[in-house]
Image (tube, rainbow, N blue to C red):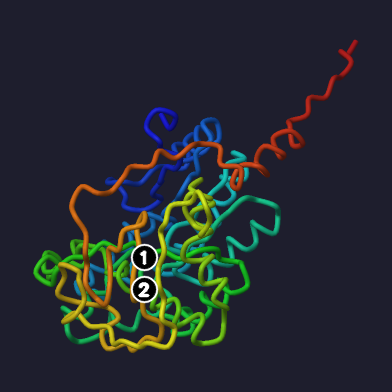
Amino acid sequence: MNSFLGINSLKFFLAYKNVFMVNDDEFFQGLKKCREIGALARVHAENGNVIAEKQKELLAMGITGPEGHTQSRPEELEAEATNRACIMASQANCPLYVVHVMSKGAASAIAYHRSKGNVIFGEPIAAGLVCDGSHYYNKNWEHSAAFVLSPPLSRDPTTPSALMDLLACGQLHLTATDNCTFTCKQKQLGRTDFTKIPNGVNGVEDRMSVVWEKGVHSGKIDPMRFVAITSTTAARIFNLYPRKGRIAVGSDADVVIWNPDATRTISAATHHHAHDYNIFEGMTVHGVPEMTISRGAVVWENGKLNVQPGTGKFIALAPNCNYVFSAIKARAKTNKPICVLRDVDC
């Protein structure tokens, strides 16, 4: 499949029972297939079975608002599923990429399994580096619903800072957004049942500034680490490097001109999303992109887009990325099953 279509990663869901969720046996078979074809397995790690039961319990108790979303998905369920996914990936000798790491427990599971030599990558997102789960208890329903995503934001207010610390020391590896926006009207689908609130928040437009603010401006990381966790590491993992992820002769001319001294205040009134809410509303950030160049063409300058539909180019991604699979191949040679030959009993 990947050889013909340019696909080198597959995503598995351990949550969303009866919709996207795979069972453990299906997941394990999928991991083995990914290893066989040289594809990276990505996983949304939450315990979908327990979530489904807790949702029923909370609704029966009359808890129908967004606060039910976070109470039905406690952090322990993300940590358990992350640990389970890492164990299964190890047994399948398959590299694993854990998407949207939202809790300390999930991050700790990743760090533990990496310490055992397993090839695991952890990806926190912009929302989780800034916001916490207190928003789910806001008395304004629209405000609370705007923050609904899965896994939910941590109810521990120290988690955003802790996740940035882990990015700084290399126990987490890159940043993303899981950007999936819905208008306030669309979120109203779950007005009387939190399980029906469309899951998703914004992030893609503000990610770079948010990470700079919480990472570089705060003194936790330097600009080189910023480049790594926002660009280069992703290019390496998905086998785009060195075409992407670096500035060099032969690489695509994809460049962001960054002003570290400029500031801006994030607001739904000025963002470019087709979305009437911004979870970073009112946040002043240091570090602003002044110009973006894509394949040599200026596509963003001074707050204005300059793009033409249809100018994008599909890049077929080759399997068996050495950055991801080199250790996997070595383990396959050294960790083969052992057969003991015994004398036949008389």
Instruction: Give percent across and percent down for residue 17.
Output: 31, 49
Question: Outermost residue toward the left?
Answer: 185
Instruction: Give percent across and percent down for residue 248.
Output: 53, 56
Looking at this view, is 284 or 149 the one in front?
Answer: 284
Give the residue at x 58% y 74%.
168
| Distance CA(mark 1)–CA(mark 2) | 7 Å
Question: Outermost residue toward the top?
Answer: 346
- Please indicate, yes or no, whether residue 177 appears anywhere in the rendered image: yes
Disc 2 marks a residue whose amino acid type is Ala
Looking at this view, is 155 or 72 the one in front?
Answer: 155
Where does label 2 land, which residue?
A: 127
Sequence-earlier tag: 1 or 2: 2
Q: In this view, does 279 lie above or below 305?
A: below
Image quadrant for the C terminus? top right
Q: In this view, does 165 lie above or below 312?
A: below
Where does label 1 land, which residue?
A: 177
Looking at this view, is 144 or 171 the one in front?
Answer: 171
Asked whether, in this view, residue 40 is left or right of residue 153, the answer is right
Instruction: Give percent across and percent down for residue 96.
Output: 53, 49
Give the residue at x 51% y 39%.
31
Image quadrant for the N terminus? top left
Crowd tier of the residue under label 1, counting other residues whose Cα lies within 10 Å: few below 14, some 14–19, many 20 or above: many
- Labels in figure, total: 2
Q: Residue 283 carries which label?
A: none
Find numbered disc 2 in the image and state the secondary structure of the residue it sits on. helix
> For residue 223, what is the image quadrant?
bottom right
Disc 1 marks a residue whose amino acid type is Thr
Find numbered disc 1 in the image and state the secondary structure of the residue it sits on. loop
Asked whether, in this view, residue 305 is left or right of residue 84, the answer is left
Tag 1 near tag 2, CB within 8 Å: yes
